[in-house]
Image (tube, rainbow, N blue to C red):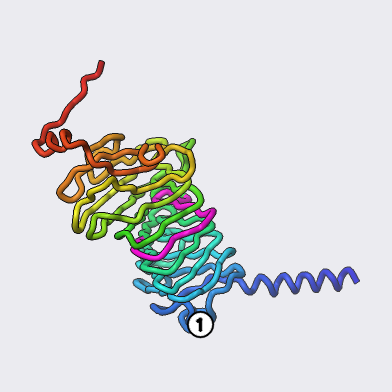
Amino acid sequence: MKLKLFTILLLAGVLVSTTSASIYPTGSGNWAEPTLWDKGYVPLDDGDEIKIGNGDGYTVTVNTDVGAYNLTKIDTARDCTLLITEGASLQTGREMHIGDAGMSGSGTDIGYLTQTGGTLTNEGKLQIGYKLGGDGTYTISGGALTGSGGRIYVGCSSADGSIGTLKVVGSAATITQGNMMYIANDSSSSSGNTGTGTIEFELAADGTVSPIHVTETIVDSMNEEAALAQLIVTATGADPVAPLLLIENTSGELVRGMFDTVNGVAGVEGAYVPVGSSVYQLTYTGGDGNDIMLLIPEPATLALLSLGVFIVRKKK
């Protein structure tokens, strides 16, 4: 009896294990179409590792509710794009690797996540640039990135040497994560994994932008030479006419670390940053005392800046 029971359990284990696999798209197309995938079925939430990178330049589009993938990794590489559009609903509770240098096969380690609408619910790790040589870009211009427990890693995931860019375009998106965001260094207390992490905001025509809401922001916190944290803010239309909230820390924690550069200027507290035809002042203590913002300088300071006059305080 014990032998029969063991045999049944062993067979059951074999049957379960055969349901998980690496699954690739065979070209560009819609996620919900079984014929898109090399296994002939839409990926399952049973351990399938979804690898968007079987051929160069594929785009997999999500425009419907494809469900929650809590046990599955989703990777992009080989110049491939995961496109999330209006009507989409995708949830992951484990890992997303955008620009995955760990994906097997030949080709580039560049990958993209582009969101113009719909909802991406991240309850795990959203890793933009994964491992040495991984180069990922997540561009969001609409819809919602949400998740009560999600973390974001920008250019600092799994190993030294990754490159990541999180780009926010305009003011139509909602970006809220219930955990930390790491930029260029994935640790707040030791060197950790370092790389190149860029946060980029492209303002809407009226000079506004969607802010990023996270519990805590860690920006190259140990000031590692190997880490490069960059903030870029561009104006395509009107210059901002009010203080510009870029990253809101929803907890009481202060921002840890600072950007190496902001629009090419050293990203120190109080730095004067050119945006469009105007100049703004960078702070890591805005809002409730722990938000990253661009402030409008006092009129007298603006006048001096317009004349190219800089005030240098002497050390005592």
Q: Position of residue 234 (x, y in %)?
A: 23, 53
Q: Residue 47 location in percent, x, y?
A: 59, 67
Q: Circle 1 sits on which residue?
A: 34
Which residue is drawn at the image coordinates 34% and 56% (left, top)? 210
**Where 43 falls versus 239 (above or below)?**
below
**Rendered location of residue 151, percent (x, y):** 49, 52
Q: Residue at x 27, y 49 (%)?
A: 232
Q: Nearer the viewer, residue 258 or 292?
A: 292
Residue neighbourhood size for the residue with mark 1, other residues' Cα within 10 Å, grouped as few (<14), some (14–19), many (≥20): some
From the viewer's perspective, is residue 247 above or below residue 8? above
Residue found 43% across the figure and 42% down from its top: 218
- Whether residue 289 appears in magenta in the rendering, the answer is no
The C terminus is located in which quarter?
A: top left
- Tell me, yes or no, if residue 136 can be seen here: yes
Name the outermost residue toward the bottom: 35
Q: Quadrant of residue 45?
A: bottom right
Residue 143 within the segment the image draws in magenta? yes
Q: Secondary structure at mark 1?
A: helix
SS assignment for the magenta stretch, majority: strand
Find the residue positioned furthest to the top.
316
Which span of residues is magenta-colored?
139-158
The quarter of the image holding the N terminus is: bottom right
Q: Going 50% across and 82% down the picture, which residue do you hit?
A: 34
Q: Nearer the viewer, residue 36 or 183?
A: 183
Is residue 224 visible in the rendered image? The answer is no
**Residue projecting furthest to the left:** 307
